[in-house]
Every structure is written in structure tokens, then in C-alpha cells.
Amino acid sequence: MTCLKASKLTFLLCLLISFSWVRSAHPREDFLKCLSLHFEDSAAMSNVVHTPYDSSYGSILQFSIRNLRFNSSDLKPLVIVTPTNASHIQAAILCSRRHNLQIRIRSGGHDFEGLSYMAAVPFVIIDLISLRAVNVDATNRTAWVQAGATLGELYYSISEKSRTLAFPAGSCPTIGVGGHFSGGGHGTMVRKFGLASDNVIDAHLIDSKGRILDRASMGEDLFWAIRGGGGQSFGVVVAWKISLVEVPSTVTMFSVSRTLEQNATKLLHRWQYVANTLPEDIVIDVLVTRVNSSQEGNTTIQATFFSLFLGEVDQLLPVMQESFPELGLVKDDCFEMSWIESIFYTAGFTSNASLDALLNRTPRSISRFKAKSDYVKEPMPEIAFEGIWERFFEEDIEVPALILIPYGGKMDEISESSTPFPHRAGNLYALVSSVSWSEESKEASRRHVAWIRRLYSYSTTYVSKNPREAYVNYRDLDIGINNLTGTTSYKQASIWGRKYFKNNFERLVRVKTEVDPTNFFRNEQSIPSLSSW
Ligand SMILES: Cc1cc2nc3c(=O)[nH]c(=O)nc-3n(C[C@H](O)[C@H](O)[C@H](O)COP(=O)(O)OP(=O)(O)OC[C@H]3O[C@@H](n4cnc5c(N)ncnc54)[C@H](O)[C@@H]3O)c2cc1C
Ligand SMILES: *[C@@H]1O[C@H](CO)[C@@H](O)[C@H](O)[C@H]1NC(C)=O
Ligand SMILES: *[C@@H]1O[C@H](CO)[C@@H](O)[C@H](O)[C@H]1NC(C)=O
Ligand SMILES: *[C@@H]1O[C@H](CO)[C@@H](O)[C@H](O)[C@H]1NC(C)=O
Ligand SMILES: *[C@@H]1O[C@H](CO)[C@@H](O)[C@H](O)[C@H]1NC(C)=O
Ligand SMILES: *[C@@H]1O[C@H](CO)[C@@H](O)[C@H](O)[C@H]1NC(C)=O
Ligand SMILES: *[C@@H]1O[C@H](CO)[C@@H](O)[C@H](O)[C@H]1NC(C)=O
Ligand SMILES: *[C@@H]1O[C@H](CO)[C@@H](O)[C@H](O)[C@H]1NC(C)=O
Ligand SMILES: *[C@@H]1O[C@H](CO)[C@@H](O)[C@H](O)[C@H]1NC(C)=O
């Protein structure tokens, strides 16, 4: 572009454009100076602003890394801001804009690809760890939950107020509500109550101009976009208002494992016809892993059928006998408990641990992993599973796993366009494949990532097509090209955009273009703004 024969107007435009690309020689210092104007004193600022020269920086950065694959990444932020007040977020946004720094927003840090804390450009992390109050209104059956709260903190706070109130969201208690609710959020009550995002009724969001908006002031388009469109594209969510759901005071769980020798493949095949047509009070998830058979040390595959039923065991058994007799469920496999105990049990805690373990933000275990998601619309034939098992048996990979999450029920009743999350009627289940490993080497990483890409390629025939759908909360940078600069073209974006959002992608782009025309809030898979191209 040349400004040589420009009129005054285009000259100014060119100036504006080139100005926005000037990088400061001292971006960190300029950013800090700008921030300091927003704090009353340096003591107030030092509690909230962390640079590599502070001893707090390393521990805060590392604390919420939930995929060890990225634990020793060089792509570190210039500054981490841990706001304790919305005004700190406003200041961080304004100062990042002014000094051309990208921001990354982190709540629970579970992003599969580490996008909430890594970038290949100069950037600042806004880490919401200190904004995590949960305010439960049991009378009105609502709660305000700040974005930095974890699911464990939310569930625990609800259980302090009532044994029969609950919230339908994911199973892992260290997940942050900031990322989770903005991408959907499915868990053990998804067939009865839908996604976490389906139960959000208001939100506080800070936009690219630094304005604090609620549902009324942001308008229904933007409120639609942040409930399933994925975090980071539209602003910083500070808090959600959610509608709580009612559950019986006694629920029932079971966990039944079967190996290949115990007909696991046949059961899994049958499960595909049953799980999404059961009464919506029952969710039976399946976890498939490779294990040693108990007798001999022979390696085998094991499918664990893991279930939450919103009712008592005597109601559950006849239903299971009628619909899924092959599983051979007996009363001894079942445990009655309260809903919060079911959360606790699902999270893998043993019964003698205290419930407040749900408040612990450090996961019980953490690994290096790569995962991918699919949606299955026609039952897969047994031979398809057998092909997957062959790959599971390959010796040079550590921990392969499949997780199958049944839909149907409430998920079938919500239209594809009512929120950005489009995977509704017609999906039997979500299929997650993952591989995790402990060896810290580039070679181990390469080998395991290559393995799961081969598995993904093998599965193509059996899963959704045109597009091959995927769940945005199970982020996968393999879908669409990227280079960690947070810049993608519209054409690239529409590749993963259609997989995650189907036809809702266009509406997301319209909303983005309207509310963040300069594409300030971005990452490798954020919604593109048309006006920035
Ligand atoms: C071990 C594990 C178990 C999981 N189990 C489930 C499950 O049972 N069900 C399920 O549905 N999903 C599950 N997930 C996926 C999980 O829902 C997503 O990774 C989710 O996005 C995590 O949210 P977070 O706040 O913890 O992550 P973060 O890494 O903090 O954020 C994820 C994304 O959201 C953005 N973001 C975060 N906070 C905000 C905010 N306040 N405002 C705007 N954008 C924000 C980030 O920038 C990033 O792009 C699991 C993930 C892991 C690692
Ligand atoms: C992550 O890296 C930090 C240092 O960068 C190290 O101290 C820590 O032990 C690592 N965590 C794990 C679980 O390996
Ligand atoms: C943020 O600071 C303002 C002004 O001091 C105060 O009114 C408000 O209550 C604070 N908010 C939070 C969440 O602490
Ligand atoms: C319930 O909501 C109503 C209307 O929003 C409000 O007036 C009332 O105070 C709420 N109840 C409680 C217990 O907070
Ligand atoms: C597996 O299935 C076969 C026939 O379908 C049956 O004969 C056998 O008993 C089953 N094995 C187990 C362990 O259930
Ligand atoms: C493994 O299984 C086979 C037959 O299924 C059996 O012959 C063998 O003894 C078992 N044990 C070992 C250690 O291979
Ligand atoms: C499986 O059993 C063999 C032989 O007992 C043992 O060497 C191996 O470590 C076991 N593997 C796992 C994953 O338990
Ligand atoms: C809980 O019980 C298990 C075995 O029943 C035991 O190994 C564990 O140490 C106990 N944990 C606590 C916190 O008491
Ligand atoms: C990253 O990709 C974008 C979009 O294709 C491109 O414009 C940019 O130059 C790339 N950056 C690097 C460092 O390769």
C-alpha cells in the first residue's frame, strides 16, 4: 500500500493503519506504566501485576497449566495480571490495546492446546484465579458465579445451600467456569438438562472498549454468542448468572467394567443403540482404556460403563434389565448417594476423603495429552471398534483412551441455532479420543501426537461428515492451519468454524465483526472479524 498520492483523508487512514502496527521497543515497561495510572498505589498494583522479575510470576503461570505438554513452553507472557476487581481487567484491556499487546484470558487453564496461557507474539495473561466468588440464591434457584471459580467450587457452594439443587456441567472439578460455560459444558446430567451454557441466564462481560456489559446492555446477539461460541473471541467474562436445577435427594451411581474377554466390544456396540434412548434421568458414559487382564498380565482393552441415575436403585434396576440386560447390572454394582457425593465419586475421590476436597484447585493427577472429538450419528459396527483396539495395542504409546458421552433427551429438544453449540438432535454420542504420556521428550510428544492423528484418520468413515463435527471445548489445533500467532484467515477459520459451530459460524462472525471489529480478542481459533480483513 502506498500513501504517496493520497488525499488528506487517505493519508490519515494510512497513518492510523501503520500506527496500529508500530511495536514499542519496551512493550512491557510501557504497558506497566500505563497500568500504574489505573492503580491508587504501587502496593495495590504489585498484588495484581506479575512480571518475570517477581517471584510470584513462575508459580502463578504454572499453577493453572493443565496439560504438561506445555509446562516447559518458551511462549511466556510479558506480564500476568490477576485482577481482584473488574477495574483491573478494564485497565489491562485498555493498556494492551494501547501498546499492541495480545491478551490471553485464563480461568481454569484446561484448554487442550494451552491457548489461555501461550502465544507466539508479545502478550499479557489476564488470569481470573482471584475472581471466584460463588453466590447461591437457593430460594430463587439461581447463582452468580465469577469466571475464575472452578466447577468443584461451584458444586460445593450449591451443596452447602441444598441437597436437591444442582448444576449440569462437566465432571472434572478443577475446570474453570470461564472457559467451560463459554464453550458449552456437558456432564453426567446432559440428557436431562442440556449443557452448562443452556442454563446460563445472564453474564457480566468486559468488551474490547473496556465496557462492563450485562445481558440487557450487551444485547441478545452477543449474549447468544458467548454461550457456546468458545471463550476469548468476544471479551472477558467476569461472571455468569446460572439457573440451578432440581435433583432428587438420593441418586444412584454404578461403574461396571468389562474386558474384551468379557465381551466388551459387543456391549459397547449394543450401548450405542441404548444409551441415547434411555429415560433422560440416566446417563451411561463409557471409558475405554488398555489394561492388564487381572489373571495373567495379558494386555487387554477394558470398557467401563459409568452411570449417574437421578433416582433410587430400585427404580434403576428394572429399567436397566429391560433396556440393557446384556450389561448384567446387579444391585451390588450400584451405590445410592446425594448428588454432591456423585460429583465427588465421579472426580475419583475415595469415600473417606472430605467433600471439601472439591475446593482443591490442584488436580489429583495431570499428564501430557493430546485429544480429539467427534460426533457419532450411526452406530459404529463392531469391526470399527476392533480396528481401534488394534491401534490401542500398539506398544510404543502409553495411555490411549476413548470416552463416549451419550446425548439424546434434552439435547434433542434444543434447536441447532438456539445457541452456537450445534451438536443436538441426530447425534447418538460425543466420541473423545485421547492419548496421554509421562515421558518428557520431543520424540515422545511427536510419537503420541502422530498416533492420535492416525487414529483420527482411521475413524473418518464412522463419524459425522461434511463437516466432520467437533466440540470447541475439546480444542484441536490440527483442524485448520495455525502458527500460534493468533492470526488466521477467514478461509482457514471457516474450516474449524464449521466443525465446531456448523451454520452458526456465520452468525458468530457477524456478532464478532459488530462488537470487536479490530479483532482485539483473538487466539488461533477465535472467531474472525470481517472488518479486520
Ligand atoms: C481433564 C479435563 C477434563 C475435562 N472434562 C470435561 C467435561 O467433563 N465436560 C466438558 O464439556 N468439557 C471438559 N473438558 C474441557 C473443558 O470444558 C474446556 O477445556 C474448557 O474450555 C476449560 O475451561 P477453563 O476455564 O478451565 O480453561 P482455560 O484454559 O482457562 O480457558 C479455555 C478457553 O476459554 C477462554 N477463556 C477462559 N476464561 C475466559 C473468560 N473468563 N472470558 C472469556 N474467555 C475465557 C480461554 O482464553 C481459552 O480460550 C475437560 C478438560 C480437561 C483438561
Ligand atoms: C513444570 O515446570 C516447572 C518449572 O518450569 C517445574 O518446577 C515443575 O516441576 C513442572 N511440573 C511438572 C508436573 O512436571
Ligand atoms: C471494585 O472496586 C470498586 C471501586 O473501589 C468497588 O466499588 C467494587 O465493589 C469493587 N468490586 C469488586 C468485585 O471488588
Ligand atoms: C428472588 O428474586 C427476586 C426478583 O429478582 C428478588 O426480589 C428477591 O430478593 C430474590 N430472592 C432472594 C431470596 O434473594
Ligand atoms: C460373551 O458372549 C457369548 C456369546 O455371545 C457368551 O456365550 C459368553 O458367555 C459371554 N461372555 C461373558 C463373560 O459374558
Ligand atoms: C495370556 O493369554 C493366553 C491365551 O489367551 C494364555 O495362553 C497365556 O498363558 C496368557 N498369559 C500370558 C502371560 O501370556
Ligand atoms: C502388565 O503386566 C506386566 C506383567 O505382569 C507388567 O510387566 C506390566 O508393567 C503391566 N502393565 C501395566 C500397564 O500394568
Ligand atoms: C481412605 O481409605 C483408603 C482405603 O480404604 C486408604 O488407602 C486411604 O489412605 C484413606 N484416605 C484417607 C484420607 O483416610
Ligand atoms: C501466521 O499465519 C498468518 C496467517 O496465515 C500469517 O499472516 C503470518 O505471517 C504467520 N506468522 C508466522 C510467524 O509464520
Image (cartoon, grey):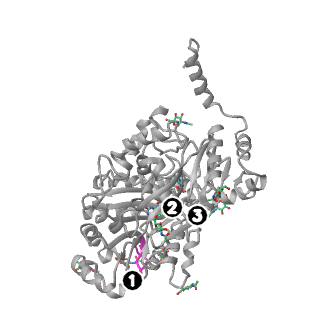
Tell me which residue sits at (71%, 53%) in the image.
Answer: 50
- Which label was assigned to residue 250? 1
Q: Residue furthest top?
A: 5
Residue count near mark 1 (Cα–Cα under 10 Å), binned few <14, some 14–19, many ≥20:
some
Q: Earlier in the sequence, mark 1 or mark 2?
A: 2
Identify residue type, mark 2: Val
**Label 2 to label 3, Cα distance in Å?**
9 Å
Q: Quadrant of the N terminus?
A: top right
User: What is the magenta range?
Assistant: 290-300
The residue where tag 3 is placed is: 132
Identify residue type, mark 1: Thr
Q: Residue furthest left?
A: 322
Q: Residue 455 versus residue 250: which sits nearer the camera? A: 250
Identify residue type, mark 3: Arg
Tell me which residue sits at (48%, 45%) in the image.
Answer: 526
Quick one: SS at disc 3?
loop
> Considering only vertical position in the picture, is 314 above or below 73?
below
Residue 396 visible in the picture:
no
**Label 1 to label 2, Cα distance in Å?**
26 Å
Q: Is mark 2 within 8 Å of ligand 1?
A: yes
Q: Is mark 3 within 8 Å of ligand 1?
A: no
Q: How many marks?
A: 3
Q: Is mark 1 within 8 Å of ligand 1?
A: no
